Image (spheres, helix red, strand yellow):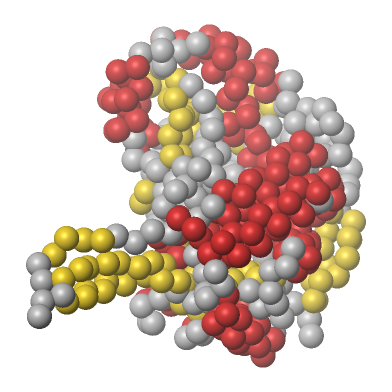
């Protein structure tokens, strides 16, 4: 059996070794989940709901432990990690209400009664990324379990620790063995087996667009359902009539949160030309106030990148073509020494074809570009293969609505950078994904609609 040494990204020191499942172990885990499905799907909705509420309560009791584990494993700031653990609790509580409200319909027809049922799919394979290990795990397993499915979840190799602990807490809450299985392993082994194993009826994947496309191609072989939450290159659009003080003060949080390792990061800032210089002055003040350092310190705003490899990838975006450095407008500060640190960086692209405007950086680097009018702002925002999120800053409600309808993205905020709420749908346009997670309709993605007609004619 192979293993992976988990590294603390703030210190570059090993935390512990985690065993990685091989193909045989993966098949056994899927078989156990398939066996558990037969009883879990028939568990009374009220009892399933009760178990999910117990799971949420235990998570709530262990929030500080989970948060500290995530700080060590992923380098998240302590405040962010506490929020993320709390989000797992909240998502479980939200979907604990779903089993008793998973309604079908009675459809008026001639000659009888027609009713529909929402039937669970079976075993669901959930593949979780390293950037937000706890919340994204819960976004997959909570609605899947609520609908009556069983789940085998593969955490990222870099960040398995909180997922493993959540699996233990599920058992403590009374969730039966095999209903939620946490299975660390390589994507080429465990993730690939989710795609090919016939007992896995759906794959939920969050990660890169390239890998997501491969998963979709593989699942097509069995016509297997997929939900894909992929890359992003979101725009933060700032109009001249916006509250510039507030827009500049909040812009760092829109792109540098989690060290920019966020598919919703507003890594392009589009500013109306008439206020471009004014905004940049205010933005520089805000960037220089971003405190980068020990994620355990309460006043730290930004922690490290996840790995040395990720730091190299982010740095490559500043090299430019033929070795030329990008035009850096200004940078914040970051620690030296051990750990995978990178300073908050603001770049002025040389032209509209610059890769920093088109490719996902996944680090604390933002490109700022001026625009003339509303039409150009929308065109620039849409000039990308991605369409996940974005922000619009304006005092004009009509403009806010027009631009919101014009921007090709799944999750937009006006005068805010909030992208995700567990009570509203989340997902992307174009190459940012397929399907929606969260919100009141999430169970639709984990069920099949069955139609039953009962004849009443003599």
- The one nearer the camera, 290 or 453, is 453
The number of numbered badges drawn on the structure is 0
Q: Residue at x 58, y 25 (%)?
A: 251
Residue 252, horizontal then vertical, whole percent:
62, 27
Q: Residue at x 66, y 78 (%)?
A: 178
| Residue sitting farthest toward the front | 458
Q: Is residue 260 above or below residue 175?
A: above
Any part of residue 311 in sight:
no
Q: Is residue 361 above or below residue 211?
A: above
- The one nearer the camera, 209 or 102, is 102
- The one nearer the camera, 264 or 275, is 264
Left or right, 245 with reference to 378 = right
Q: Quadrant of residue 412?
A: top left
Q: Residue at x 49, y 50 (%)?
A: 438
| Residue sitting farthest toward the bottom | 24
Left or right, 33 with reference to 227 = right
Q: Quadrant of residue 174?
A: bottom right
């Amino acid at each position: 059996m192979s293993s992976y040494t988990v590294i603390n990204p703030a210190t570059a020191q090993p935390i512990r070794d985690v065993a990685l499942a091989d193909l045989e172990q993966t098949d056994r885990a899927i078989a156990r989940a398939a066996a558990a499905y037969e009883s879990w799907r028939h568990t009374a909705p009220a009892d399933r709901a009760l178990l999910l509420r117990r799971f949420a309560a235990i998570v709530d009791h262990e929030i500080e432990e989970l948060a500290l584990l995530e700080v060590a494993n992923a380098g998240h700031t302590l405040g962010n990690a506490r929020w993320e653990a709390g989000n797992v609790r909240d998502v479980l509580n939200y979907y604990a209400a779903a089993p008793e409200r998973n309604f079908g319909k009675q459809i008026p027809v001639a000659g009888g009664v027609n009713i529909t049922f929402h039937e669970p799919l079976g075993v669901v394979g959930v593949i979780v990324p390293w950037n937000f290990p706890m919340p994204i795990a819960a976004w997959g397993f909570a609605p899947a379990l609520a609908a009556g499915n069983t789940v085998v979840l593969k955490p990222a190799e870099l960040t398995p620790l909180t997922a493993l602990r959540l699996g233990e807490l599920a058992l403590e809450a009374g969730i039966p063995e095999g209903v939620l299985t946490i299975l660390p392993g390589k994507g080429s082994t465990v993730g690939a087996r989710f795609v090919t194993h016939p007992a896995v009826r759906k794959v939920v994947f969050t990660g890169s667009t390239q890998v997501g496309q491969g998963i979709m191609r593989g699942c097509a072989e069995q016509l297997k359902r997929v939900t894909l939450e992929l890359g992003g290159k979101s725009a933060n659009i700032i109009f001249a009539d916006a509250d510039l003080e507030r827009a500049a003060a909040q812009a760092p949080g829109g792109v540098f949160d989690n060290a920019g390792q966020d598919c919703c990061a507003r890594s392009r800032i589009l500013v109306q030309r008439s206020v471009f210089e004014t905004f940049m002055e205010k933005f520089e003040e805000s960037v220089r106030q971003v405190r980068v350092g020990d994620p355990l310190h309460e006043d730290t705003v930004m922690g490290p990148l996840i790995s040395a490899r990720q730091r190299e990838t982010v740095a490559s975006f500043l090299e430019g073509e033929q070795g030329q450095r990008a035009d850096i407008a200004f940078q914040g500060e970051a620690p030296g020494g051990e750990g995978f640190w990178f300073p908050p960086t603001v770049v002025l692209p040389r032209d509209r074809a610059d890769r920093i405007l088109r490719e996902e950086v996944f680090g604390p680097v933002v490109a700022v570009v001026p625009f003339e009018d509303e039409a150009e702002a929308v065109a620039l925002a849409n000039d990308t293969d991605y369409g996940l999120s974005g922000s619009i800053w304006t005092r004009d409600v009509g403009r806010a609505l027009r631009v919101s309808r014009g921007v090709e993205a799944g999750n937009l905020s006006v005068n805010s950078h909030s992208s995700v709420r567990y009570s509203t749908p989340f997902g992307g346009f174009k190459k940012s994904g397929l399907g929606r997670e969260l919100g009141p309709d999430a169970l639709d993605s984990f069920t099949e609609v069955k139609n039953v007609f009962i004849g009443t004619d003599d």
